[in-house]
Image: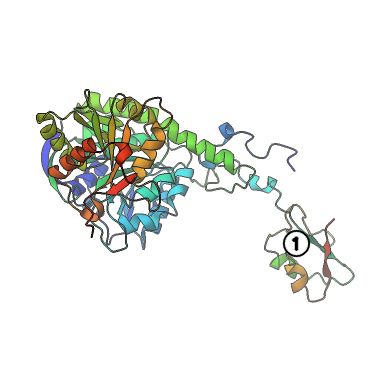
Amino acid sequence: MADAKKWPESWQEVNRGCVVFRPGSAGEYHTGSWRAQRPVWDNAKCIKCGLCYIVCPEGCISEGEDGFFSANLDYCKGCGICPHECWPRAIKMVEEG
Amino acid sequence: MSKRIGMEVAVAAAEAAALCRFDVAAVYPITPQSHIAEHLSDIVADGRIDAEFITVESEHSAMSCAMGAAATGARVVTATSSQGLMYMHEVLPIASAMRLPIVMAIANRAVSGPLNILNDHSDIMPQRDSGWISIFAENGQEVVDMMIQAFKIAEHRDVQLPVNVNIDGFQLTHMVEPMEMPDQAEVDKFLPPLVPYATLHPDRPVSMGTFAMNDVYTEVLKAKDQALINSKKVILQVWKEWEKLFGRKYAPIVGYKTEDAEILMLTMGSMGETAEIAVDELRARGVSVGLLKMKLWRPFPFDELRKAVRGTKTLIVMDRAVSFGGPGGPVAGEVRSALYDQRSRPAIVNEIIGLGGRDMMVEHFIDIVERATRTGEKKKKSAYEFYGVREA
């Protein structure tokens, strides 16, 4: 998972009090690795209402230039809320792997 | 110049914090608080120092509030006792993990149940593994001195850990004692302004209280353990400096008439003074006995303890708390562990004394020593006993 160094390699490198001095660096920590299912959009059914974008608890769904939505799989945990809330049924969960 | 005064010890603890010019005091103001909280409030309300006094809705909030204030770079003091400390427990390891140099005065009292709140150490002992520096005062003078020393130790750039100063509830907190109160100029000279490692400031964003899963949690805890171990060097430095400035000597373990002693008692807190009188009387009768007074509980003074018991036949460890179903008292458990690897070590007798405010008089300490001389370790029925417990 760690291509670049994302946390201290040794205890000596731990910042005092684990203070993080680089704002926004938590984004480098990809939290979607334990996802079992992922959301897949059928844009033929999507009405671009943006409800999935609103309800995503991870805030990892964003609108593309074409107005359709997709999830950033680095952070999506496959919770399944977006297909549950999508009333045109444009999203379905598919098994990972 | 220091001034010799007579003052209630709890009030003196707050006065000592005021001499350190604390910025924020966050306390929960009702039972089982001591006058420390009340007097901190007086000091702020009277405008004697430029500080905020925050009354919170619980001790859990008191510590959380203290942490928030310390995270902004404020010098923070708080005080608690008994159930209040138990309620703070959840937050204590976070304060140390975040390396926030908070100073907390603890009026040591029993915990429920049954409801008691009189003096013993059963409130602080469950906090043992919270990662705080923990020191024990023996009398009013030590309370004043240790409160001021605590800020210097906590804030030292090689430490940055919270410190609790343990003050026996009632036996110390509610006593009026004579003491030398340092003056403002002396304390200002001793204690420089706080230079925080990091602060919460909108112009320089940092994250505090971060997340660490199994990939890094072990490293973080190892670093915290090492921080505690390393703090001892600074504690010794600070005590040396204190002795130079004020003439009063501090050490992790202070011996009293330990020369060639075959029997040593070990106490923490105010009972050391009573035990001293017992040592005097026993020495007058020709009993080869001495006393070790442990002032530093965390980091544990392994080297000092090993050195102090060298050549002693019997070490009587006095505990003022119980580790139920465990090794007896928590202090004895640690002392045994510290001496286990030594080639020669004394027999250890563990007496659990003074629980829930039960008085320990000079004759009780004499009785304990006399009984220890009669029964060697081999004859002991149990690794520990509840001294003076009434039995059918």
Please, which residue is most extreme toward the front here? B379
Q: Position of residue B182 (x, y in %)?
A: 19, 35
Q: Considering the numbered disc 1 on the image, is that residue within a helix, a strand or a loop?
A: loop
- Residue B194 visible somewhere in the drawing: no
- Residue B87 visible somewhere in the drawing: yes
In the image, residue B345 sits, relative to residue A38, either above or below, namely above
Q: Please tell me which residue is depicted at 70% across the width and 68% down the height of the picture.
A: A55
Q: Nearer the viewer, residue B216 or B103?
A: B216
Q: Nearer the viewer, residue B202 or B143?
A: B143
Q: Position of residue B101 (x, y in %)?
A: 40, 41
Q: Position of residue B200 (x, y in %)?
A: 49, 46
In which quarter of the view is residue B374 placed?
Answer: top left
Q: Which residue is mark 1?
A: A78
In the image, residue A38 sits, relative to residue A4, either above or below, namely below
Q: Please tell me which residue is depicted at 57% across the width and 36% down the height of the picture.
A: A14
Q: Position of residue B253 (x, y in %)?
A: 29, 31
Image quadrant for the C terminus of chain B?
Answer: bottom left
Type of residue at label 1?
Answer: Gly
Q: Is residue B352 left or right of residue B226?
A: left
Please, which residue is most extreme toward the right here? A44
Q: Please tell me which residue is depicted at 33% across the width and 25% down the height of the picture.
A: B307
Chain hosting mark 1 = A
- Mark 1 Cα within 10 Å, few/some/many (few <14, many 20+)? many
